[in-house]
Image: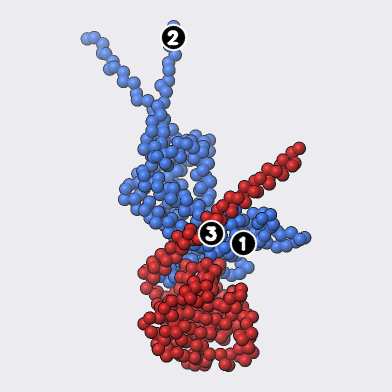
Amino acid sequence: MTLPRRGLLQGAGATLGALWLSGCDKIAENPQVVKVLSSAEVLNRRVQRLLGRGALAREFSKADITPAFKANGTINPPDADYQAMVANDFADWKLVVDGLVERPLALSLDQLKALPSRTQITRHDCVEGWSCIGEWTGVKFGALMDLAGLKPAAKHIVLYCADTLGGAKYYETLDVVDAHHPQTILAYAMNGAPLSIAHGAPIRLRAERYLGYKQAKYVMRLEAVDRYDHIAGGQGGFWEDQGYDRYGGI
Amino acid sequence: MTIAATTPKPIRVLVRRHAAIVRVTHWLNAISLCLLLLSGLQIFNAHPDLYFGQQSHFGHQWLGMGAYERGGTLHGVTVVDGYVFDTTGFLGASRDHGVLVSRGFPAWLTIPSVRYLALGRRWHFFFAWVFAINLTLYLASAALGGHLKRDLVPTLSQIKPRHVLHEIWDHMRLRFPKGEEARRYNVLQKGAYLGVVVLLLPVMILSGMTMSPSLDADFPWLIDLFQGRQSARSIHFITASLIVLFFFVHMVMVVLSGTWNNVRSMITGRYAIEADPPPLSLPAPIGDAP
């Protein structure tokens, strides 16, 4: 009989194929292997910091703005406390700045808007591969840091967010060296209108030399720290805890 | 009694074909390109649509893969410039543990086989460094050591249209250069190898760098060179496809022109050619007696 034999051969082929794939995956996902591979991330960061010296990302014209800028990740935080703030139009919302700073702050949206601001039309690059161009207006991150007075021990800024994604609170970390980059802002307006909920109302980070997952939305608190390995998964961000690189510049 | 004139038998001689640096960089290049392709397809699958320009005009991709459900089964489609092709089982929708699922390239073509962008990126960037350093070493030694000029740049006589057409005609009839002619690359080989090492491979690196927002800030000319990040992503994909095409042609030519001889020459450096026998040294004719 040919049919069962053919079935048997196909079955054997599929089994061999599955074995081959699981064998490859065992190597691909081996923690020791991943550790070696991750050394490239360190190399990316060091080389790019060395080459770049904080050059500005390209800025575009109003004509280049993407008509339908894609909102990704959380687009409407399910968290009750966030929804309460929305109901109240963020009237009681305050941005907390604490940790390794001389003067801890709690600023309302109006107080933030009174600080030095910057408007920039830039390209947003998602780690998935797509890009959109948008205009952002926000308080200069560096000015805010100067107001709080970073202590010399501060190496990173942790951004705690209001949204829960996949069971964990979103957060990100930014190196102090990037906090003073002219294009690093906490944006409260997009394309000339107040930031929408889908894009991170009331404020989100824009650090234009980095990928989309670094651009934390629904920012509630900034903490200056010298290390971040005790926070959440310890990798320095929500997606970083899922295995994405913390540098995020490529 | 007549003695049949025996045609002298060609002699097989081993010539030194590939220098050690060419052999080492060739295999490192092969390994890293293979891993870069498979991890690259994992990254592509995160957004299996390609655009031209600075940004993604969603719905206006020139190449896209996706799946839709009809009659209880999943159909995989590939859209090229508006034309829709059913590619169920390979592109758009393929089998994962026997079940059709929506994904760009199938599991057996990605590292890792499951959808795992973060891990695909780790593999990609590690081997991107191996690949880039390896290519730099090769190009530097090829330029300084004379390999580029001596072995890869066609000679003036080789680029005459008549000669090129003749080579194409010979290749189509699977007639490959023999004897002394086999000591050097023919013009089609030179063109293919040169195109890969000075054009396709460097374009892979540059278009890859253009997808980095940080490197774009440092080297804004990259964005202008490729006319935008999304164009760079498309060119990265197209160039990778051309390298895959080169690979298949390369494999066919290796097999047709002597698998073991070619493989050995890339491992030990020795390549066998059939040399013409040395001309018989006849005694000088004795002149007529005065």
The residue that label 2 is drawn on is: B2
Q: Which mark is residue A48?
A: none
Camera sees residue A213: no
The residue that label 1 is drawn on is: B64
Q: Chain of mark 3?
A: A
Which dot, 3 or 1, sits closer to the camera? 3
Q: Residue at the location (68% across, 46% down)?
A: A11
Q: In the structure shown, which secondary structural element does the residue marked by tag 2 occupy? A: loop
User: Residue A120: x and y, percent?
Assistant: 48, 80
User: Residue A110: x and y, percent?
Assistant: 52, 93
Q: In the structure shown, which secondary structural element does the residue marked by tag 3 occupy? A: helix
Residue A183, compared with residue B39, is above or below; it is below
The residue that label 3 is drawn on is: A29
Q: In the structure shown, which secondary structural element does the residue marked by tag 1 occupy? A: strand
Q: Amino acid at mark 3?
A: Glu
Q: CA distance from mark 2 to mark 3?
A: 76 Å
User: Residue A133: x and y, percent?
Assistant: 53, 75
Q: CA distance from mark 3 to mark 1?
A: 28 Å
- Outermost residue, left side: B290
For the residue carrying disc 2, how many other residues have a C-alpha within 10 Å: few (<14), some (14-19), or many (20+)?
few
Q: CA distance from mark 1 to mark 2?
A: 75 Å
- Outermost residue, right side: B71
Q: Residue at the location (62% across, 82% down)?
A: A79
- Outermost residue, front side: A230
Q: Seen in the image, is A57 located left or right of residue A129?
A: left
Which dot, 1 or 2, sits closer to the camera? 1
The chain that appears blue in the image is B
User: Which of the 4 image quarters holds residue B183?
Assistant: top left
Q: Chain of mark 1?
A: B
Q: Quadrant of the C terminus of chain B?
A: top left
Q: Amino acid at mark 2?
A: Thr
Q: Which scheme is used to colour this image of the protein?
A: by chain
